[in-house]
Image (spheres, rainbow, N blue to C red):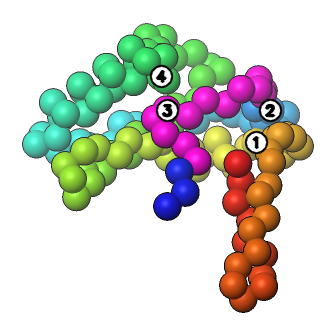
């Protein structure tokens, strides 16, 4: 099995997300979280904050976009925590972002090529 990433990934380049002119930021209300996973979610969010993955925001101003937090309990009882960026995605202006990757081509027994990003 090929393992390309382990642990917490980090995007090494700085990139600004540009929204179209006239876009009005949307603040979505919080979704309900089942009481059975609330302590686990709170611990997970504190862990992500300690690692610098997320940052607590105490003040929401007119330039702040707030997306819903989506929490799913995985079969192994760990939490998968994501954002639902539907509203902000509608307003983002696509910009080219060049990622530097190396591609390894492997010839299989069928003489086809398989690509692996390394």
Residue in the foreground of this view, choosing between 103 and 100: 103
Q: Is residue 81 above or below residue 25?
A: below
Q: Is residue 21 above or below residue 72?
A: above
- Mark 3 and mark 2 lie on one chain; the one further toward the N terminus is 3
Q: Which residues are magenta?
A: 4-16
State which mark lies toward you, 3 or 2.
3
> Is 7 in the magenta?
yes
Name the disc covering residue 23, or none: none
Percent position (x, y) of residue 79?
28, 44
Pick whichever, 97 or 38, lies toward us.
97
Q: Earlier in the sequence, mark 1 or mark 3?
A: 3
Q: Sequence order check: which comes first, mark 1 or mark 4?
A: 4
Instruction: Give how far apart the Cα atoms at labels 4 and 2 are.
Output: 20 Å
List the residue tagged with mark 4.
54
Which quarter of the figure has residue 78?
Answer: top left
Q: Are marks 2 and 1 in contact (CB under 8 Å)?
A: yes
First-in-chain label (4 vs 2): 2
Name the disc covering residue 92, or none: 1
Q: What's the mark number on residue 8? A: 3
Q: Assess disc 4: are there few (<14), some (14-19) or many (≥20) residues with their C-alpha within 10 Å of its C-alpha.
A: few
What residue is shown with label 2? 18
Task: Describe residue 98's horizontal placement relative to residue 68 as left or right.
Answer: right
The reply to whether discs 4 and 2 touch (Cβ–Cβ < 8 Å) is: no
């Amino acid at each position: 099995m090929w393992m390309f990433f382990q642990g917490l990934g980090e995007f090494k380049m700085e990139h600004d997300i540009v929204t179209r002119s006239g876009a009005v930021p949307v603040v979505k209300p919080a979704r309900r979280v089942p009481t059975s996973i609330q302590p686990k979610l709170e611990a997970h969010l504190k862990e992500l904050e300690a690692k610098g993955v997320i940052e607590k925001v105490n003040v929401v101003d007119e330039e702040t976009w707030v997306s819903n937090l989506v929490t799913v309990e995985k079969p192994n009882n760990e939490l998968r925590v994501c954002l639902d960026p539907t509203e902000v995605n509608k307003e983002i202006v696509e910009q080219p972002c060049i990622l530097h990757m190396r591609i390894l081509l492997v010839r299989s027994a069928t003489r086809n090529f398989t690509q692996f990003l390394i």
